[in-house]
Image (cartoon, rainbow, N blue to C red):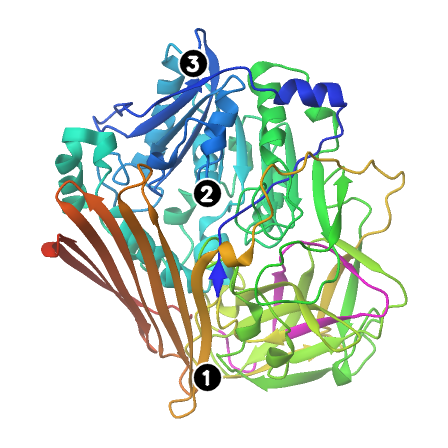
Amino acid sequence: MLAQHTVRFILISSLTATVLGAVSQPRYKVKIDRTARPVMRDGVELGAVVVRPDAEGQFPAIMNYTPYRTLSHVKSSYDEEKYSNTIHGPSYFAERGYAVVYYDVRGTGNSGGSSQDIYSEKEQNDAYDMVEWIAAQLWCDGGVGMWGYSYGGVVQWQVGIKNPPHLKTLVVGSSNDDVYLDWVYPGGSLRPYMFDTYSPLMAAFNFAPPDIDLVGQKWTEIWEERLANNRPWGIGYITHPVHGSYWTDRSLQPDYSRVKVPTLLWSGWADVYPTPILRAFANLEVPKKALVGPWGHWWPEMAVPGPRIDGRHELLKWYDHWLKGMDTGVMDEPPVTLFVKEYKEPEPAMYIDDNGFWRFENEWPPARNENTPMYLHADGLLSEDSSASAPEEADQYTYDPTVGATSGIYWGGGVLPWGMAIDQRTDEALSLTYTTPPLEEDLETIGEPIAVLYVSSSATSAYFHVKLTDVAPDGTSKWIADEGLLASHRNSHAVPEPLEPGEIYELRIPLKFVAYVFPKGHRIRVDIASADFQNAWPVAEKAVNKIHRGGRNPSYVVLPITPAQDPKLPTPEFKPSPRPAPKLEDLNTVKHEITRDLVSDTVTVHLMAQRNGKSDDGRRQTGRYISSNYTVSKANPAEASMRAGCRLTLNGPEGEIIVESSETLVSDITSFRFLTQVEVTVQGKPHFNKSWRVSVPRRLN
């Protein structure tokens, strides 16, 4: 199997052809400066690349930073730019009158200093200092905007909260606004992705050397400092299992009013982040726009699934308005642009193109929504009929920690485009299901479904996971949205509370946002289980759980039903992507396998992603290999294990450098135990070897 990284983007554009042409034409030749090393308030030098017009004068600037070792990939020609999930065409904007600045997080890539935690306070202070450093350069007119997605989106919230004086606008792509709930511990449950892919990748990245072509004689000094002082970021994830200041110090939530500058937001429905992007849009108190396409975790020009658009053109309209004061018409359009999805049979890989259509909305969620309760009934029926008059009953099931193989993996990176949700019927055989009769007409839903469940358990802690699916006439059950919640977190993600076995509790579980049309003749289904195997670490205790319905405990799901617009808004129009549609055979080599050991009664997910290539000079070979095995015991759910590693192959002044990380995360009934190790060899000889070990008590999870 093969896989690739591409993303896309969408924005509202119903401008005249004259205006569209005016904002998109290149005017300047481009120059690139790879020697910039701004000095931060504590004396640390950061590695930066500046791409700007090769002309006299001052220009507004656009800033981006990540820890992903991207500086050597920044190109001085738009025609030379390669597909990338982190570099987004700096020369395109430089040709149109912008200075674009990329820099590496301290302690990573080509920057000095050290890094002990993701999104540290020092890293956030650096971003403030960089905005002001850029504004003070002779080539800058004093106005600085930001852009980026994923890591590059989260950090914009952190900079926006600090409000440096010369920051004028943000363009926040697919990213979270609550690092705890949206990324590491959704519903209070540890997300396996953090350790099957991201933590080992960053352990290897953060101990790798800088690029000697960019840092020159400082190469040894920079590398030795990070080898001596860096710490794997996974330690922070596992040692902060409940919500608190560690996470709020890194998040936009809870106070959105701290952001004071105009903000453009975008994401894709096949990504993990459209919900926090639209939630942030709804809560920001600044000039704002939101765009959600069908895409996965990529820029819009390259993304799967399509349709792809020229996202750079859409960004340019925003920047020209807010950084140059031009009338591009971008703020005259409705503030929300959505791709509304329609049925397409599920596949194990992302579709090259999804089914659906573009829609403008005046707000999120649409004010015309009719929030409709759909109640759980006997015999697996789901209907709008209130169950208040029905006898109070309960459906029970035995907790199976391996349910969730068909749900796919909520990627924010990883081995995309594989690991997508497939036909849900295999998991539904091990879940409670409630299904409507066939729909008599199409039913459109745009907004936030919410499950209100009355539950009880034989255990002191249990996890409840709810899925919304579209059941086709042939029985295929297509994943539409889901979410889970640790019942011990029902009142607080900071202070978990045990369950009293047998007692009934109300759980309110908001599902991921949707924009979808259920077709006539299809049925709507709600699935309930106590595991999401690939996305939530299993709860330790065995349990028999119950879903109560009818009488005083009428479990239901609120579905936002969206009537037609009246009056109907115009249809969004976009310039087509300048990139050709990607092909699956051109994507990176990956594996995504799920196997069951019938002797030990365990289930294992094996992931592998491999990328090979040459450095920008065309000579030096580079490579990256990530592999993991995540095993869950059906017989003893407390005992789960993750073993993962990453190997980077680089080229240094003395020859081949290999940086390898290996990580093990295991749980039992009392604790999580985490071991991470980094080993470096130069020309086959040992250069560095260090390990870290932590143990964390389980807290009702």
Mark 3 surroundings within 10 Å by alpha-carbon count, few (fewer than 14), some (14 through 19), many (20 or more): some
- Say which of marks 1 and 2 sits in front: 2
Q: Which quadrant holds residue 611?
A: bottom left
Residue occupying image coordinates x 38% and y 9%: 138
**Image quadrant containing the C terminus:** bottom left
Q: Which residue is mark 2?
A: 84
| Circle 2: element type | loop
Residue occupying image coordinates x 51% and y 47%: 176
Q: Give, as a three-letter code, the residue at label 3.
A: Asp
Q: Which residue is mark 1?
A: 542
Estimate the spatial distance between the alpha carbons at disc 3 and disc 1, rounded to whole Å.
66 Å
Q: Disc 3 vs disc 1: Cβ atoms closer than 8 Å?
A: no
Question: Where residue 292 sits: x, y (%)?
Answer: 65, 44
Please report the bounds of the magenta region as a residue range: 499-527
Position above or below: 100 against 573? above
Q: Which quadrant holds residue 606?
A: bottom left
Q: Which residue is mark 3?
A: 54
